[in-house]
Image (cartoon, rainbow, N blue to C red):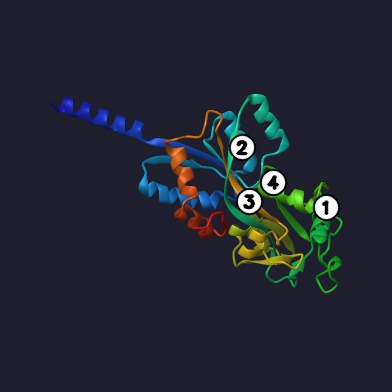
Amino acid sequence: MKKFWLVFMLLIMGISIFATETLVIKGSNTVFPIAQLWIEELKKQYDIRITLEGAGSSTGIAALFNGTADIANSSRWLKDKELVRMHEEGKYFVPFIIGYDGIAIIVNKKLNIESISLEELKDIYTGKIRYWAQLNPNLPKKPIVVYSRNTASGTFETFENIVLKGEKMSPTVRMVESTQLEIDSVKNNPYAIAYTGLGYVTEDVKILKVEKVMPTKATILSGEYPISRPLFMFIDATNGLPDRGPVKIYINFAVSKKGQELVEKAGYIAAYGF
C-alpha cells in the first residue's frame, strides 16, 4: 500500500511539473526592469515558469531567430540585416510597442553643467572634444571620461543613429555591458559622462538638458526631446499570433492598464492610456 501511494505521489508531481508552462524572454537591458515588474505580477496570477535575460536588444532578436526565446525585448527597431534575414528564412516577427523612453545624458552631480547640444555630444563621443574646458572655460581643465553601452545594446544603436549620425565612436570611449555600471561610474567620477534609459537614472547623478530640453513625459511623447524612442517586444508570428498560452497571457498583460502602470512605475512612459 505504501508503494502504491509513493508511485501515486510521484505521478502527481510529474503531472504538476509538466503542467507548468514556460516562457523565455531575452533582450534589452533598458526593458529589463519593466519585464521584471510584469513577471512579478504575473506569477501571482498564473502558474508560469518565466526566465528573463537582459544582455542587449541584439541578443534578444538573435535568440528569436534561433528559437531560444519566446519574446525579444528591444529598445530599437529591427536592423536592415535582420529584416533581410527574416525574408531569407521565411520568418515574420511582430512588434508590440510597450512604452516610450528618452535616452538621458548623465554627468556627476558636482559638475557645473546643465545643458549640452547634440553637436557637442557628437564631438565628445567621436573624440573631437576631450576636455570639459573645451565646452566652457569655466568647466575643469580635466579629460572627459566617456562611457557607452556596448554594441549589443539597442540604446547604443539609438544613440549612434541620432547623435553620431554615421560617425564612429572614439576608441577611448569606455564600452560597458551594464547600464547600472554606467550610473555607478558617473556617480563616482566627477569628470564622467554617459547615456542611459531614463528609467535607470537615480538621484546619484545629474541629467543634462539636450538642446535645452529636459527629458520628461511631455517632451518624450511629443518628440521635443531629441533622443526619444519607443520600446518594443517582438514575437515570432511566422505561424500566426498565439491564441492561448503564456506568450498571449504576457502580451495581454503588457498592454493592459495594470501592465502600463508598471511601465510608468519602472520610470518610463506608458504607450497606452486607459
Q: Which mark is residue 126?
A: 1
Q: Is residue 216 visible?
A: no
| Callout 4–callout 1 Cβ contact below 8 Å | no
Return the disc, 1 or 2, that comes first in the chain's sequence: 2
The answer to whether residue 50 is left or right of residue 202 is left
Choose between 211 and 138: the one closer to the eye.
211
| Mark 4 residue crowding within 10 angstroms, few (<14) / some (14–19) / many (20+) | some
Q: Which residue is mark 2?
A: 61
The image shows residue 46 at horizontal and vertical percentages of 37, 44
Q: Disc 4 and disc 2: Cα gap in Å? A: 16 Å
Report helix, strand or loop for mark 3. Answer: strand
Report helix, strand or loop for mark 4. Answer: loop
Q: Disc 3 and disc 1: Cα gap in Å? A: 25 Å
Q: Amino acid at mark 2?
A: Ile
Q: Which residue is mark 4?
A: 150
Return the disc, 3 or 4, that comes first in the chain's sequence: 4
